[in-house]
Amino acid sequence: MTSPQRTARLAGAMYLVLFVCGSFSIFVRSGLVVPGDARATSANILASEFLFRLQLVSELVMSVAWLMVAFLLYILFKSVHRHLALLFLLFAAIGVATICANMVFQAGVLVVLGEKGFVAGMDTAYLQAQVGMFLTLFSRGWTISGIFTGLWLYPLGLLVIKSGYVPRVFGIGLIVGCFGYLTPVVTVFLVPQLAKFNLAIMSVSGMVEVSFGLWLLFKGANPPPDLQPGAQGFVPSNNETYE
């Protein structure tokens, strides 16, 4: 198996970790958080505190997996166009940092509900309101992180189309998916009455990424003949060789 194949399949494996951890976190939060009802939400989290903590850790693992995916794809595509590869790696790195910083709001929920010594004497209704505020801020931060969740797909899609390593339809899908992830940024902050369509739009973008990740995992990458190691005119980037 060539080095591009190994790199692509490892990226696909990391993509799978990203999908599983991210989906688990979203599923758990949707079951615990009752929109507009801080009291019920607080009761749910207290009743399933370990599950809430687990989804928090799962989202952090997802962030690390995303960074690994971006790095491995950078290795795979840098010989095609280094600047575009650096661009999507930069967007992904900023996105990971944004997600991790946003997790502070979930940690704040645990401080309010779990560390009794720190919040001793505070009114219960006030604490529940704080939980609601932290989770609302987390939701807004999650929307903002979608800027980078979307933007990194555009240069990646261009590279997929340009390289021919995988079917070019994935590149087109990734570019479309970029705008799907960016849509909630517009609807939530500028046209909130359209926010009800966000889930459907983002689901399409997510399906494109899932399909791309699974292709990498099971099919790998197949450089065109003129980019195959040993082909006449093939020059590895930075004098690198593929074994």
Image (cartoon, rainbow, N blue to C red):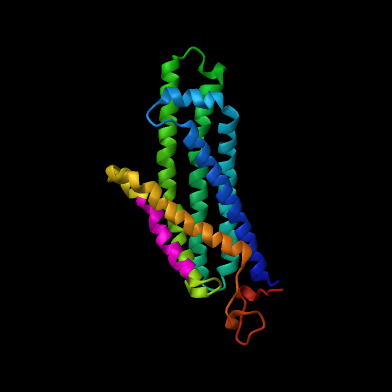
**Residue farthest along the bottom direction in this orientation:** 232
Q: Is residue 236 shown above or below 211?
A: below
The residue sitting at 40% across, 62% down in the picture is 176
The residue sitting at 50% across, 26% down in the picture is 44
Q: Is residue 89 shown above or below 188?
A: below
The residue sitting at 49% across, 12% down in the picture is 121
Magenta span: 169-183
Magenta-colored stretch includes residue 179? yes
The residue nearer to you, when weighing 58 against 88, is 58
Q: Position of residue 95 (x, y in %)?
A: 48, 50
Type of secondary structure dominating the magenta stretch:
helix
Dividing the picture into quarters, in which one does residue 242 lie?
Answer: bottom right
The residue nearer to you, when weighing 82 against 47, is 47
Q: Quadrant of the C terminus?
A: bottom right
Q: Quadrant of the N terminus?
A: bottom right
In the displayed structure image, the side of residue 217 where residue 181 appears, left or right: left
**Residue farthest along the top direction in this orientation:** 121
Q: Position of residue 23 (x, y in %)?
A: 53, 45
Q: Is residue 104 shown above or below 227?
A: above
Mark count: 0
